[in-house]
Amino acid sequence: MISSDIAFTPSVKAIQQQKGSRAAYRRIEEGGGWQTEVTADLAAFLAEQRTAYLATVNADGQPYIQHRGGPAGFIRTLDAHTLGFADYRGNRQFITLGNLADNPKAHLFVMDYVHRRRVKIWGTLEAVEGDEAFVKSLMPQGYKATPERALLFHVAAWDSNCPQHIPMMIPADDVAAALAERDAKIAALTAKLENMR
């Protein structure tokens, strides 16, 4: 199996053929398909991210997507095939955990709005309960959240997309820091001008 077959099923390939994009994706397949290991570039990208979307499906095939977030680097690279992050206390619906009881397949969609980049990661998800030391090791330092378990994402394949249609958005705390720096420079220059008069 070619790694990109995780998404390019026979039905998808048939539609690609019908719509005229199959030849381009066939060339990717001839090159081996998508990446199957966490590369240094992917690890560096993940270390900068503050937000991701985690998808699972239930026994009936109904998808569920949940936002996951935290300080930059909350998704940790544990080895060439495993990502990990702490699962914080939330709304107590436990849909993701329930879905995992039926089907371990999962997808991480990681969006970098600042640099207009996105990475799609396919694999399986595992919940690790009762290992407090391990969960603590995945907690971002100083982050005010209550971790309940660890989630391990076992990477099967990943791909990055073009930036087309991704809006550029900058986190509010980054904007506030930039404005504070600007205001401090303006105040320093104003004081300097006053002293020159």
Image (cartoon, helix red, strand yellow):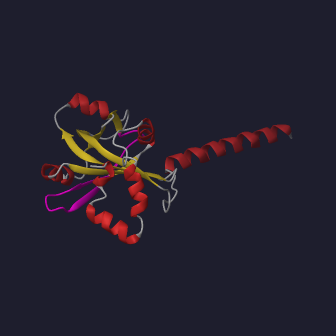
User: As drawn, which residue projects farthest toward the right?
Assistant: 197
Residue 36 x %, y %: 33, 42
Horizontal relation, residue 80 to residue 60: left or right? right
Residue 125 x %, y %: 23, 45
Residue 68: in magenta span = yes
Horizontal relation, residue 101 to residue 52: left or right? left
Q: Residue at x 65, y 45 (%)?
A: 182
- How many marks can you see? 0
Q: Residue at x 20, y 42 (%)?
A: 126
Q: Residue at x 35, y 36 (%)?
A: 76
- Name the image quarter holding the C terminus: top right
Magenta-highlighted residues = 54-75
Taking depth in this image into account, of 89 and 73 the one nearest to the observer is 73
Residue 131: in magenta span = no
User: As drawn, which residue projects farthest toward the top?
Assistant: 133
Taking depth in this image into account, of 15 and 123 the one nearest to the observer is 15
Instruction: Mark yes or no: residue 110 visible.
Output: no
Say above or below: 56 vs 81: below
Taking depth in this image into account, of 73 and 9 the one nearest to the observer is 9
Residue 195 x %, y %: 82, 37
Instruction: Mark yes or no: residue 171 visible.
Output: yes
Residue 29 x %, y %: 37, 52
